[in-house]
Image: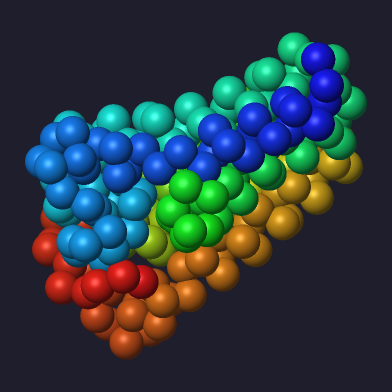
Amino acid sequence: MNPYLILLACYLLGAVQFGLLVGKLWKGIDLRQYGSGNVGATNALRTLGPVPAALVFIADVAKGAVPVAVCRLAGFPPSLVVLGGMLAVLGHIFSIFSRFTGGKGAATGLGVLLGLSPAVGFTAFALWLAVVTATRYISLASIVGALSVPVWMWAFRLPLEYRLFGIAAALLVVVRHKSNIRRLMAGTEPRFGEQADIRKE
């Protein structure tokens, strides 16, 4: 199969906004019009509840892992496998189906990590969980988890292409969380379990 078509499919899968679909099916609402206005699992949790949030999270992780698996099955070299994963993340953030807007990329990035290296993916997720438990700030946990990825990539001695992806993905996640960083510094970021009173980050 044409590798360009596969890479295009990686982007298009990443561009599917499962948060919007779950919001419509679960409550008949556009998730972008509630809470933070984000289409990810965190806003789904605050707006829809734990079960639909879990569905959004699992779907967003899967749309990062599946492109990596498909690229590997297609016999792509590591550089193109990484590119397929990155296109899925970019599709999630800049969705062609939502006028090139979207989520912040953390869950889809986790899916890519799990596809590239389960050891790195689970280690980063464990750190994310530890930060959430200690602080109840999901955004802070996402930032810390993302910044840890390049460290784990080097620690586990993964290929250079994977390490470069780790750096690029970490920077992208941090940039996408710039509004959260401002609220964390101002002490106004909602904690896990609190209702957000912000709109469209």
Q: Is residue 32 left or right of residue 120?
A: left
Residues 140 and 108: in front is: 108
Protein image colouring:
rainbow
Q: Is residue 49 visible?
A: no
Q: Position of residue 25 (x, y in %)?
A: 18, 33
Q: Is residue 107 left or right of residue 86?
A: left
Q: Which residue occupies 57% across, 27% down?
A: 65
The furthest residue to the bottom: 186
Q: Position of residue 48 (x, y in %)?
A: 14, 45
Q: How many marks?
A: 0
Q: Position of residue 196 (x, y in %)?
A: 17, 67
Query: Which image quarter holds the C terminus?
Result: bottom left
Q: Position of residue 146 (x, y in %)?
A: 56, 54
Q: Which residue occupies 34% across, 52% down?
A: 39
Query: Which image quarter holds the N terminus?
Result: top right
Q: Which residue occupies 52% across, 58% down?
A: 100
Residues 156 and 5: in front is: 5
Query: Is the residue 168 above or below the residue 55 in the image?
Result: below
Q: Is residue 167 left or right of residue 113?
A: right
Residues 3 and 179: in front is: 3
Q: Is residue 201 visible?
A: yes
Query: Is the residue 40 above or below the residue 136 in the image?
Result: above
Q: Is residue 41 left or right of residue 168?
A: left
Specify the quadrant of the image occupied by residue 189.
Answer: bottom left
Q: Which residue occupies 46% across, 38% down?
A: 16
